[in-house]
Image (cartoon, rainbow, N blue to C red):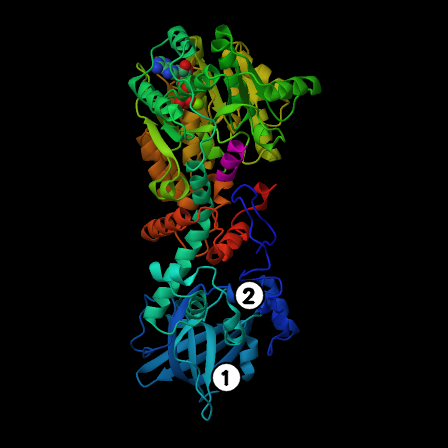
């Protein structure tokens, strides 16, 4: 758990530390585990490997499964479908064996009045001295098929001996903890039991009693006890409920604090939405907006005219025309004498937006600056000066805008393009650059319903559900490597018909030398294959100017084939390019493939996508199939969710911010709703959590390890 960490902008006043925090610095729960009776140096070391050094760590270290020792089945009745089988039986005979020089195997024949079964212990040699024929044991483990003896055997994970004249081992529901080399269930159960019986009275509850009563939550103390050693089903169920509730509670609280603040704050003020600039912009466009674009712009107008800040998510599939919607929104800021920010996840996309602004906004007399990571000193100085002057300005840039120390003077609107590439906390940080500016978030990657509620519940939504006229969906083909020559011949043909081609190679990380080599090799070979065609290359290791130069040549059709890594994955818009070849397509994620394919089909006429791949796993086959079957981003996103699960859908940035311990955003939707209701009620009466009853919540929220340190500065 991270300590002494707080997020200055979440709450106005930070409660003092020495009040009721459940793990204050002098809490007995911070007693080193090593000082407990029965924990020797060796056990302490093993526990430390599981990151367990204090009593509190142990209390927070939860079982991964349970074994139910009430009503143990007879040997005859054991069910082969159970994940963990527990038996009480007598040891009939024993034998030991050494397999290789590593694995120690102990075998026994177990029997009860109904039958016999073979049991096997791997690498638990200490039991050699403990187990004796004639003793009764309670063992639990997995049932496995033994190839050699052609029968079922029990691979034992935990063992308890029932000695004749001693109290017999517990026949309750027992925890099964994750283990580490040399540590056994029996030992860690002892430690955990010890921690509970000695220290449970020190467990503090951050949730006040009235709140718990209102939302049917048992105390934290009772929860911890029953998570480790469930007393019965009902209490275990309550414990699990509280654990899930709390998990979601800490995860959701920051969003809602932020949302409440926003609602109670007037922010940057209304924007002018019907000025001459917007009119002029639309008149100069070489096309008319689609109805969907118009509708979304109207949504934005309504928000921007309001006194409270806009907070809207715009979803529209690749190529649906989100950039124009963004431009019109930026004009609302300019027309109101304010600044507007357009943030992009890659430098290439930021550059492209910059070019668009120069083409379409400069003629209207609007100034645009570009802010990115690496800039010449003089350029940077001028840009920063412009940002800090009073006047209206469009600022296009990469995450350098967020990271930079500058406040943006007179900021009316922020837009994040391809918002799924950013973390939720980055979203909050950008908004902090001004005085609660209006905010728009644009994405082509539909957000799964489960995540919508949890991570985007504070946003209004609009959807661009229509493509500009004349677009035909890409024709997608799949072929193995041996089709390469055919595919290349096709490309040559397209180029002869004045079109352009992308050829994309996988590059897992920008530092992967072998991958990069294969892209560069491919580029070199293509130059030899097509001596009359200009072939360019683009990857993340190139200098900024080189990248700009290549993109600009590709845009002007001075380059016909662009060999690239995934740097072109999002946003890149060159309508004349109508063919996309993806090499080793099995190595790309599904939404990544969809985004890449979205680089084509941005103008009139047919377009073609070739997946050249050698898929070996079931999931890579599924991904390719999904792409062949559909070009609808929503359908593809659903399939992607099925394949990957919600955690990964968020992308690395956001997944890092959601570290749920027990809750599952899909399974626990109804608890999530309850949690959100609870938080809203809490904040309605006490938006800054200053009431003495809520101090522990406030502190816990600030310190909670779920909120990563990177957002704290
Ligand atoms: P995305 O939603 O993927 O960001 P863009 O804004 O880049 O899409 O638009 C894709 C292409 O479609 C661009 O070349 C753009 O100029 C063009 N476009 C946008 N809106 C229209 C429209 N209403 N009619 C015709 N072409 C359009
Ligand atoms: Mg775009």
Residue projecting furthest to the right? 377
Rendered location of residue 352, percent (x, y): 51, 18
Residue at the image point whose x is 59% and y is 25% from the top: 520
Rendered location of residue 393, percent (x, y): 54, 17
Residue at the image point whose x is 31% and y is 14% from the top: 470
CA distance for labels 1 and 2: 34 Å
- The answer to whether residue 563 is magenta is no
Disc 1 designates what residue?
A: 131
**Numbered range of the magenta stretch:** 424-432
Rendered location of residue 447, percent (x, y): 38, 37
The nearer-to-camera label among 1 and 2 is 2
Disc 2 designates what residue?
A: 56
Any part of residue 509 in sight: yes
Q: Nearer the viewer, residue 217 or 472?
A: 217
Compared with 507, 240 (above or below) is below
Residue projecting furthest to the bottom? 165
Q: What secondary structure is marked by label 1?
A: loop
- Label disc, if present, on residue 500 of the rendered structure: none
- State the quadrant of the C terminus: top right
Rendered location of residue 682, percent (x, y): 40, 51
Name the quadrant containing residue 598. top left
Name the quadrant containing residue 619. top left
- State the quadrant of the N terminus: bottom right
Compared with 445, 339 (above or below) is above
Compared with 284, 290 (above or below) is below
Any part of residue 556 in sight: no
């Amino acid at each position: 758990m991270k300590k002494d960490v707080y997020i200055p902008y979440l709450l106005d006043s930070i409660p003092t530390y020495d009040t009721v925090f459940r793990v204050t610095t002098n809490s007995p729960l911070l007693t080193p585990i090593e000082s407990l009776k029965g924990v020797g140096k060796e056990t302490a070391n093993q526990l430390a490997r599981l990151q367990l050094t204090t009593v509190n760590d142990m209390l927070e270290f939860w079982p991964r499964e349970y074994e139910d020792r009430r009503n143990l089945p007879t040997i005859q009745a054991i069910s082969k479908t159970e994940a963990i089988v527990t038996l009480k039986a007598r040891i009939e005979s024993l034998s030991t064996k050494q397999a290789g020089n590593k694995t120690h195997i102990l075998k026994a024949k177990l029997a009860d009045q109904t039958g016999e079964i073979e049991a096997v212990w791997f690498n638990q040699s200490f039991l050699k001295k403990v187990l004796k024929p004639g003793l009764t044991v309670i063992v639990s483990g997995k049932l496995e098929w033994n190839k050699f003896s052609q029968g079922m055997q029990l691979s034992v994970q935990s063992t308890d001996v029932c000695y004749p004249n001693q109290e017999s081992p517990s026949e309750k529901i027992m925890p099964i903890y994750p283990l580490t080399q040399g540590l056994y269930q029996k030992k860690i159960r002892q430690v955990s039991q010890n921690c509970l019986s000695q220290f449970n009275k020190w467990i503090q509850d951050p949730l006040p009693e009235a709140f718990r009563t209102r939302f049917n939550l048992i105390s934290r103390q009772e929860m911890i006890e029953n998570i480790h050693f469930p007393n019965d089903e009902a209490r275990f169920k309550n414990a699990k409920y509280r654990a899930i509730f709390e998990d979601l509670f800490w995860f959701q609280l920051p969003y809602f604090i932020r949302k409440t603040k926003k609602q109670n704050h007037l922010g940057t003020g209304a924007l002018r939405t019907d000025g001459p600039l917007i009119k002029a912009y639309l008149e100069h466009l070489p096309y008319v907006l689609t109805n969907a674009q118009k509708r979304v712009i109207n949504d934005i107008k309504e928000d921007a005219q309001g006194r409270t800040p806009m907070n809207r998510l715009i979803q529209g599939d690749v190529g649906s025309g989100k950039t124009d919607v963004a431009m019109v929104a930026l004009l609302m800021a300019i027309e109101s004498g304010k600044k507007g920010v357009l943030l992009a996840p890659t430098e290439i996309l930021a550059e492209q937006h910059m070019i668009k602004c120069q083409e379409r906004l400069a003629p209207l007399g609007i100034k645009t600056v570009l802010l990115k990571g690496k800039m010449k000193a003089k350029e940077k100085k001028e840009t920063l000066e412009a940002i800090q002057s009073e006047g209206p300005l469009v600022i296009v840039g990469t995450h350098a805008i967020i990271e930079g120390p500058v406040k943006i003077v007179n900021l009316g609107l922020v837009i994040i393009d391809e918002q799924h590439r950013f973390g939720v906390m980055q979203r909050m940080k950008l908004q902090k650059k001004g005085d609660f500016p209006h905010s728009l978030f644009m994405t082509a990657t539909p957000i799964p319903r489960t995540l919508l509620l949890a991570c985007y519940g504070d946003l209004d939504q609009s959807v661009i559900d229509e493509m500009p006229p004349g677009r035909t969906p890409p024709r997608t083909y799949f072929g193995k490597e041996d089709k390469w020559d055919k595919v290349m011949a096709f490309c040559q043909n397209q180029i002869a018909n004045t079109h352009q081609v992308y050829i994309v190679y996988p590059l897992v990380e920008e530092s992967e030398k072998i991958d990069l080599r294969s892209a560069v090799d491919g580029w070199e070979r293509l130059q030899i294959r097509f001596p009359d065609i200009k072939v360019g290359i683009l990857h993340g290791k190139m200098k900024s100017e080189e990248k700009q130069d290549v993109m600009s040549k590709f845009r002007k059709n001075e380059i016909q084939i662009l060999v690239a890594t995934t740097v072109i994955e999002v946003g890149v818009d060159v309508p004349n390019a109508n063919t996309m070849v993806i090499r080793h397509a099995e190595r790309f994620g599904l939404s990544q493939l969809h985004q890449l394919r979205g680089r084509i089909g941005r103008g009139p006429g047919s377009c073609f996508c070739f997946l050249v791949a050698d898929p070996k796993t079931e999931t890579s086959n599924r991904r390719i199939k999904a792409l062949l079957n559909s070009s609808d981003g929503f359908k593809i996103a659903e399939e992607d969710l099925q394949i990957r699960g919600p955690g990964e859908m968020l992308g690395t940035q956001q997944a890092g911010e959601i570290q749920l311990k027990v809750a599952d955003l899909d399974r626990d939707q109804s608890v999530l709703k309850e949690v959100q209701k609870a938080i809203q009620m809490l904040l309605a009466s006490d938006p800054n959590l200053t009431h003495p009853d809520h101090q522990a919540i406030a502190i816990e929220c600030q310190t909670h390890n779920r909120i990563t340190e990177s957002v704290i500065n």
